[in-house]
Structures are given as C-alpha cells and as structure tokens.
Amino acid sequence: MRIATLALLGAATLGLSACDQKGVKTGTPVVGGQRATAMVQNANGIDVGRATATEVAGGLRVTLDAQTLPPGTHGVHIHTVGRCDGPDFTTAGGHWNPTGMKHGSMNPQGPHEGDLPNLIIGTDGRGTIGITIPGATMAGLLDADGAAFVVHAGPDDLMTDPAGNSGGRIACGVFQAG
Ligand SMILES: [Cu+2]
C-alpha cells in the first residue's frame, strides 16, 4: 500500500513537470532550493546533532548527523511546533501531520509527514539518518509555528499511533531557514 502510494506520488510529480523535468527522480536536489537547519540539544543544553531539511524533487530531504547520544535505537520525528523547552520538550507538540494520517510507515493509515526511520546510535554515541519525505514542502515545515526535530528515548515501532511507543523526548532542535 505504501509502495503504491509512493509510486503514485512519483508519477504525479513527474506528470506535472514532464515538459521541462522529464526523467527527474524524486529526491533530486532542486536548483536554488531552500534549506532549513536544526541544532539539536539534549535536556542539559548540550549539542547532540544537526538536522537539515532540503528541497528536492517531490519532497524534502531530511538528514541528521548525531553525536553524544545514548547507544541504541531511538525514534526520531519532525514535530509540529518549533519550540524546544527542556527538560521534556513537550512544547514541540505532536508529530508534523499536515495530511491527517495515523502514525508510522508500517501503519496502513500512515504515516505522518514527520515520521522518520529509527536512528541507530553506536557505542561511540554517533549515528546518522537520511530520507526523502514525499510531498513535504519547505513552506509547510517553516509555517507560522515552525517545526522541531525530536529524538526519543526508545525505539519507534513505526505503527502505534500517535508516536510509536518511543518513550520520552531526550533531545530537540528548532528548524530555521538557512
Ligand atoms: Cu516524536
């Protein structure tokens, strides 16, 4: 179901711009595209990573380069409000979900646009992710109340609404243009 949806989105994207962008694949960087960056900090205010969102064909490319995080698997998401008040970071609100879906890439009624793959942190405290979110836009990410990148204490089961049982929020960063 998810694969079919992605294929349809891809076809629609190509169809709209077939004249001048024939053959451009979803995820290809957009010339002159905007970028947003979030410096992610833990509850002690220590920098633990840098997230980026970049405009690409068909959506937004999101990356995280993390350090100084507890080893293991962590749910990570884009949350809907650009506020990170520690220590619990609840002011970031729920997941970014402009399309009104349920949580999780493995949920038949999902996912949220802000749902991302689990972040695997090694014994050196480091880890990375990189994914293209189909249909996501910079205007939607940087809307009036902004958006935040959030790291959770535990793994996201990628299915259970609203947050995949991924536990408390251990780090947060507000997306800002540039
Ligand atoms: Cu989250």
Image: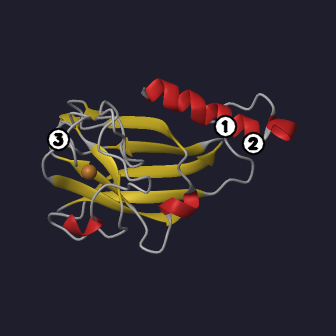
Q: Residue at x 48, y 58 (%)?
A: 37
Residue 94 location (% of width, % of height): 27, 59
Q: Residue at x 37, y 41 (%)?
A: 111
Label 2–label 1 contact, CB within 8 A: yes
Q: How far, Cα to Cα, is label 2 from label 1? A: 6 Å
Please determine whether, in this image, residue 164 is positioned above or below residue 86.
above
Q: Quadrant of residue 98?
A: bottom left
| Dot placed on the residue nearer the N-terminal end, 1 or 3 | 1
Q: Secondary structure at mark 3?
A: loop
Report the front residue among 150 and 16. Answer: 16
Q: Is residue 178 something that shows in the picture?
A: no
Q: How far, Cα to Cα, is label 1 from label 3? A: 41 Å
Please determine whether, in this image, residue 131 is positioned above or below residue 3.
below
Q: Which residue is mark 3?
A: 70
Q: Which residue is mark 1?
A: 12
Report the front residue among 159 and 173. Answer: 159
Residue 5 location (% of width, % of height): 50, 31
Q: How far, Cα to Cα, is label 3 from label 2? A: 44 Å
| Dot placed on the residue nearer the N-terminal end, 3 or 2 | 2
**Residue 71 as seen in the image, left or right of residue 4:** left
Residue 78 location (% of width, % of height): 37, 53
Three-letter amino acid code of the residue under disc 1: Ala
**Residue 121 as seen in the image, left or right of residue 81:** left
Q: Quadrant of residue 71?
A: top left
Three-letter amino acid code of the residue under disc 2: Leu
Q: Which residue is mark 2?
A: 16
Q: Residues within 10 Å of mark 2 (few under 14, many from 20)?
A: few
Label 3–label 2 contact, CB within 8 A: no
Q: Secondary structure at mark 2?
A: helix
Residue 125's disc number: none
Mark 3 or mark 2, which is nearer to you?
Answer: 2
